[in-house]
Image: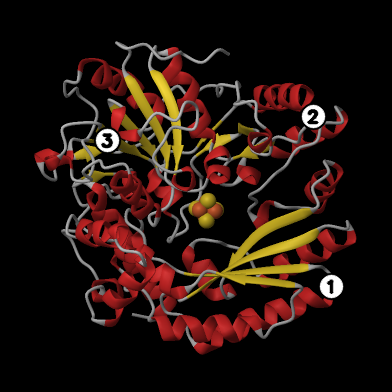
Amino acid sequence: MRRTSYRKNAIKIALLYPSTYSVAMSSAVFHILYFKLQDAGFYVERFTADRGPRGIEDGTPLSHFDYIVAAVHYELDYINLVKLLLEAGVPPRAARREAPRLIIGGPPVTANPEPVAEFADVIAVGELEPLWDSLIEYMTTGEEVEGLYYPQRGPHPVKIRHAENWSAADYRRIPEAEAAFSLSVELARGCPYSCLFCMESYISKPYRPRDWGAVLQEAAWLYRKYGIRPSLVALTASAHRHFKELLSEAVRQKLQLSIPSLRAELLDDETLELIAQLGQRTITIAPESSERLRKALGKDISDGEIIRIVRKAAELGMRVKLYLLVGVPCERDGDVQDLKRLLAEAKKTGAYLYVSVNPLVPKPQTPLQYHPMAPIPYLKKAIRAVEESPHDAFSHYDPVLAAIQAAISLGGREVSVHIENSAASNAPLGYWKRLLKNGALDYVFKPRDDPLPWGHVEGFFSSQQLKSMYEAFLKTACGH
Ligand code: SF4
């Protein structure tokens, strides 16, 4: 495809991903936007946090564009976004800016748009497809149109939108080596499960699996065209009702596929064998916590089942990556000990174990939005305890970063001051650490109640339903 070339009177769009270039290139929606915006007749250049305030294509300064369209997938990237605006000489606050207008979309702003509300002119709450026509009309006319969230009006009701008739992705890709590893085919949107901590699942309901035959055809097309294994993208690929048929057919066609996310109780021996035959070298499962907390969180998988999968994966020569959480509400010392026992058992199978531990960050739009985050010293201690278990590789997410992530994620409009100040500082992390120390972020570690800063964002479940789920969890997990 030819790029839309620069014309003086064309509407100019800076497509921005506020992380590194390689992370941007692994985002399917960034690719889709790049092509769709050009198809709609706009002049487009890409920007990423590490490439600075000039367009990747032609070096046009960010400040020369009519619109900035930012795709954001991680709350800490809000800081990079504001930093880039400052570097470009663009006033970050919408109220003090004539142009360019800033449009932000992505999962964290869908769950809670308020932390970036002071910066954005428009926030896309939900999936791209149902909002597309409104976005195009807005950027073409400059007038406010129905369907989008205009934060300058103040917090007001907005519904998370999802695609009703959702079909195949756009296959054209940026023909660069960096983009190749990210070739992907969507198998489903949403997840049929509702693990209590999982924001992605709650904001993307209902579950919408795609026709598995069509998915396979698209994967085969990509594999033949680029010679690289395409990834099947879904929150939980193995939840697809025809997952096994899809795998068998892919094996029959000698197709290589990458399957990143799996739900353990759906993995029988035959499925694992098929996955191994597809060339997958590592299997990733998420036991999360001790058996009792795992079940209370919504994952009905026993330790015995996890060991069975690890053993089978080892037999098949696959490495095993295990995602674990610490700081789960109602977690006791005994839960961490149970987790250590599980890891010790898993290691006895002879499997190569890669253990990844993350502090639980309570997220908006989930039942755990009401729960205080565990204190940082506790999280550090729990991570050290898990690290003592036998493993071959180990990584963890820093509890300090997790607390900052929570502070942004669970914040209201007032958090924008800290996003802006940290972006303007030479040491953003030091700025946030000082806030943690002086108690300015203590709301993260306290219980929360309605009305919450994102209470006007209407998701699949009402806040009463989320609260009932939370209370049921407390009863099961903490006994009160
Ligand atoms: S199975 Fe995975 S994707 Fe689905 S709700 Fe649970 S954690 Fe989220």
User: Which is nearer the eye, 214 or 75?
Assistant: 75
**Mark closest to the chain's N terminus, 1 or 3:** 3
Find out if the beta carbon at label 2 lies less than 8 Å from the nearest ligand 1 atom.
Answer: no
Disc marking residue 102: 3
On screen, residue 222 versus residue 386, left or right, reads right
Residue type at tag 3: Leu
In terms of image quadrants, where is residue 95? top left
Q: Within 10 angstroms of label 1, few (less than 14), some, or many (20 or more) residues?
A: some
Residue position marked by numbered label 2 in the rendering: 227
Whole-number angstrom distance, CA of label 1 to CA of label 3: 53 Å
User: Residue 132 in the image: x percent, y percent?
Assistant: 35, 22
Q: Earlier in the sequence, mark 2 or mark 3?
A: 3
For badge 1, the amino acid type reads Thr
Badge 2 or badge 1: first in the primary sequence: 2
State the SS at label 2: loop
Element type where label 3 sits in the image: strand
In this figure, which residue is indicated by the disc labeled 1?
Answer: 349
Task: Classify residue 384 by image quadrant.
Answer: bottom right
Indicate the amino acid at tag 2.
Answer: Gly
Measure how far apart labels 2 and 3 are at the Cα level. Answer: 38 Å
- Compute the Cα span from label 2 to label 1: 34 Å
The answer to whether any part of residue 461 appears in the image is no
Find residue 205 and report its horizontal and vertical position in percent.
Answer: 42, 41
